[in-house]
Amino acid sequence: MVRPLIYFALFFLPLLSFSQKMEEQKDPVAEKNRIKKNKISAMKLYRCDWRNGKPSSRTWLNFIETYDKNGNVLAQHWLNEDSATDLRSVYFYDKAGRLEKIDMFGRDTSRWRHEYFPSGQLRKKTLYVKDTVQQSSSTYVYDDKKRLKGICYHTTGYTESFDGCMNYMFDNLGRFAEMIYFENMPDFMVRSVMKYDDAGNQVEMASYNYNQEQMRRSVYQYDKNGNITQETLYVKPSEINTTWKYTYEYFSK
């Protein structure tokens, strides 16, 4: 069972979800202050899927995010094309204003718990199913400049457990330049390389296998607020490319 678990992690851990990608691209403090300053209470995201340059779906409401008066995320709702909720997440914060836990409601009830170093940096995330059974954990490692250097994953709840790390390297501007997954297992190692535009937006991420053959490439476009408006995924050796187009609607208090 180790091999299927490795393949699961290999192909799904590198594929950051849309919300993770947005969080990764934006300065969290600046984004929180923007929401607070403009008294934004909610954001709706609409999505349209394209395949090889042609729309393959209608434009539909895919995501709703709500905020408190301080700009913190309160809840997220993911909707499918039939307008039914696929996943709902509720956010909770500690007295210092740090994210403490996320409760998720979908096929199963699950919870992410966050732990911090005394410095305030994130130390560990632990996923529980039905709040009792530990399913996986992520441990965060930083360099002497307090930059995220790596994330190590431990997954349980399957026939066998799985461990692997994702290591980051930076460019001369302090941005993520490369990510390397599972360096301790050469046959399954993946290296992702990022490119940026003049505004600092990540416009491309290409992933290579241990033979340095490109497996996939993602290209991004943004609006003035740093929101992703278009994402195109090219997967090799297939010639098929998939594009997701996004539009946003904001609501003020």
Image: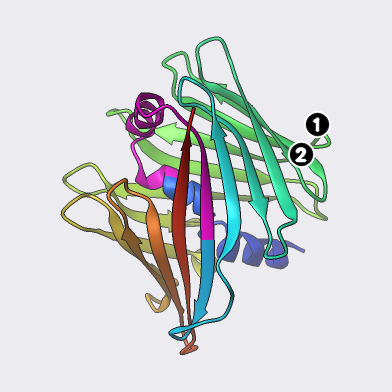
Please provide the residue range marked out in magenta: 23-46
Disc 2 residue crowd, few under 14, some 14–19, many 20+, Cα 10 Å: many
Looking at the rendered structure, the secondary structure element under dot 2 is: strand
Q: Nearer the viewer, residue 52 or 9?
A: 52
Q: Secondary structure at mark 1?
A: loop
Tell me: 126 left or right of 14.
right
Which residue is disc 1 drawn over?
Answer: 131
Residue 93, magenta (yes or no): no
Q: Is residue 4 above or below residue 175?
A: below
Q: Is residue 208 visible?
A: no
Question: Which residue is pictured at 36% across the width and 47% down the height?
Answer: 25
Residue 212 appears left or right of 41: left
Q: Label 1 near label 2: C-beta < 8 Å?
A: yes
Looking at the picture, how far across and down is residue 217, in whole percent? 40, 72
- Amino acid type assigned to the residue bearing label 1 in the image: Asp
Q: Residue at x 35, y 42 (%)?
A: 26
Disc 2 target residue: 110
| N-term-proximal mark, 2 vs 1 | 2
Q: Please state the horizontal and vertical placement of residue 116, each as a whole percent of the image.
A: 52, 21
